[in-house]
Image (cartoon, grey):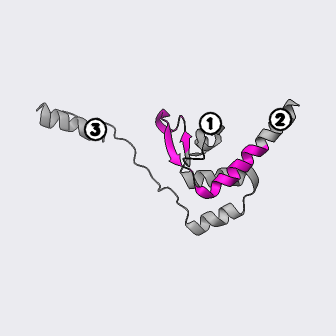
Amino acid sequence: MALSALLFLYRQVLRVDVPNIENIKRARQTRHLPVVLTREEVKTLLSNIEGVENLITSLLYGTGMRLTEGLRLRVKDIDFSGQGIITRDGKGKEDRITMLPEQLIEPLKQQLNYAKSLHDFDLA
């Protein structure tokens, strides 16, 4: 795409002939299509995962977050009242806001309460 833009610039805008473009290496085409699971496959997958792993997997599926975004998630990034999640330093080093699925609010609150009680126990 960038090569096409440069060729257009030189040929159409600057009116300059570009010699020897046959030797220019083009970007490689992807050789495979991404795998997308059906809803039934996702339900089967989630029904076979338990505990925190299920919560993380459900978050990834339900919010569209990438794996690293889900694993870096912090308490302050979750907005229960606005039903949103802020993902920081994602693809392109950009922050973005994504929706928080309603069915994950209660499990997330339970996980946060569990983590807080564990932290309080460790402090004691």
Residue 117 is left or right of residue 57, and the answer is: right
Pointer 1 residue: 76
* Residue 9 quadrant: top left
Quick check: 123 above or below 54? Answer: above
Q: What span is colored magenta in the figure?
A: 85-114
Q: CA distance from mark 3 to mark 2?
A: 58 Å
**Residue 3: assigned label:** 3
Q: Residues within 10 Å of mark 2 (few under 14, many from 20)?
A: few
In the rendering, at what x and y percent does residue 46 appear?
67, 61
| Nearer to us in this view, 118 or 26 | 118
| Nearer to us in this view, 6 or 79 | 79
Q: Is residue 105 within the magenta segment? A: yes
* Residue 124 quadrant: top right
- Mark 2, secondary structure of its residue: helix
Which numbered disc, 1 or 3, marks the residue that appears first in the sequence? 3
Pointer 2 residue: 120
Q: Residues within 10 Å of mark 3 (few under 14, many from 20)?
A: few
Q: CA distance from mark 1 to mark 3?
A: 43 Å
In the rendering, at what x and y percent does residue 75 appear?
65, 38
| Nearer to us in this view, 84 or 18 | 84
